[in-house]
Image (spheres, coloured by chain):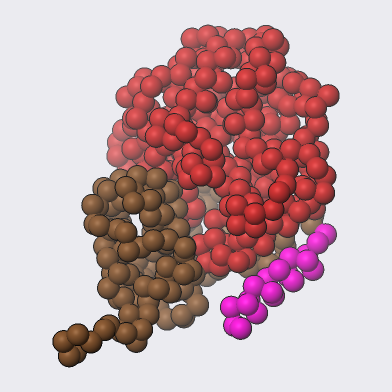
Amino acid sequence: MKPGEEIGERENSFLPKVVNASGETIDSCYQCRKCSAGCPVAYAMDILPHQIIRHIQYGHREKVLSCRTIWICASCYTCGVRCPNKVNIAGIMDTLRNMAINAGGKFGEKNVPVFHSVFLDAIKKGGRVYELGLIVQLKAKTREFLKDTALGWKMFRRGKIRLLPPPFSSKKEIREIFNVCEKGKRG
Amino acid sequence: MKEVSYYPGCSLHGTAREYDESCRGVSDLLGIKLSELKDWNCCGASSAHCTDKDLSIALAGRNLDIANKGGRELLVPCVACFSRLKAAEAETEKEGVPIRYALDFFSDEPVIEEIKKRLVRPLSGLKIVCYYGCLAVRPPQLTGVKEYENPQHMDKLMGAIGAEPLPWSYKTDCCGSSLMLVRTDIVKKLTGRILSMAREAEVDCIVVGCPICQANLDTRQGELASETGETYDLPIIYFTELIGLALGHRDVKKWLSRHIVDPVKVLSARGLI
């Protein structure tokens, strides 16, 4: 790059996109690391929350969208309420997950995105989430057939597991909501 | 009789049945009529907002439209649902009915007064810690809770029914929420910490107001015990169940029988059941 030449849209289109979609002032982060210090799940992340913000500022799109962190974030909002610059980091994580899904590609964490897609399928089909159906679908997708079967039996004996899907008569309306949102994404 | 709209959400029709039953039971004793929203749908929590913002607003928004037609205040016991409904309200900027999280609703001064008037069995001698979790307090722009690092409203409510809430430092720490089924290892790490801190405070139980917190704290104690060799047997009780007990509701034992860690043992040791 020549001296005096401006960094153009081509070099860093990622930052303005995340800012637009999240509505957050990512520029105001000065790396105090308070978000990472208070994050209860930071230990399981591959990139710490304050580093995610830095990578966005630098326009490192691939790195951010393919990392494990965005799927480990439990949306507890501890980071955002403690941020001295009022950056809602958990909200940005939502934006990044949205972007990672729309981009396709490989996710940095295996089963969390599977859980979300099974969960949304359940709502799309039935309008409400029917826990037993959800768990059966989840097991089929993650191939973890034996996980939590003893616990499931205990819960069943205590009347906590519903055997039949709940009644819901506006399924068409819910499918329409999904159709509109899916069309919006494609368009 | 006061009448409010009621949005139970999916968990309360399944794994959190006792929260639904105790909400209805307590409301009944307090003369509050709950009208369940007709044909409500899942609010989308937590997967919709994690994956598609427009979808999360639309799913929650449909329920708000139904509630707004009814014109009555909307009572929401599940804090994840509450958070999504409030987020949709903020996003759409529509003037609608007040959306009230059950803990906030029952902590209102007039409701506490009503509860005190009808106390038949004050829970004296019961040592508890109140666990608020995340979404009951955060983000404060949505919840309206001012003391979000050290909230007091559940402690006050529990004090009003005679229980003894102790101070502790894990009131608003995350339990791992929706990672429960796919990253159970993380949930166990977080709940293990919360349970150990409560144990250190030497309490009889942890009181909660969220079906996800309840499930995460209640269902993994056996595994935690066998993995660490430590004792984990703290009952995780909904605040509505304890209000029901203090008001002498006849179904309390049925509600408590649905828990994984048995709460009856400690309550009977305190002479409360």
* Residue that appears at 73% across and 65% down: A174
Report the chain shown in brown: A
Q: Is residue B148 above or below residue B202?
A: below
Residue A39: x and y, percent? Answer: 32, 49
Place of residue B95 in the rendered image (x, y in percent of width and height, measured from the top left): 71, 49
Placement of the N terminus of chain B among the 4 image quadrants: top right
- Of the pair B233 and A79, the residue shown nearer to us: A79
Display colour for chain B: red
Q: Residue at x 73, y 53 (%)?
A: B63
Residue B182: name its quadrant. Answer: bottom left
The residue positioned 66% from the left and 49% from the top of the image is: B10
Q: How many marks?
A: 0
Judged left or right of residue A160, residue B155 is left
* Residue lying furthest front: A4
B207 relative to A29, above or below: above
Magenta segment: A169-187
- Locate residue B235 relative to residue B227 in the image: left or right: right
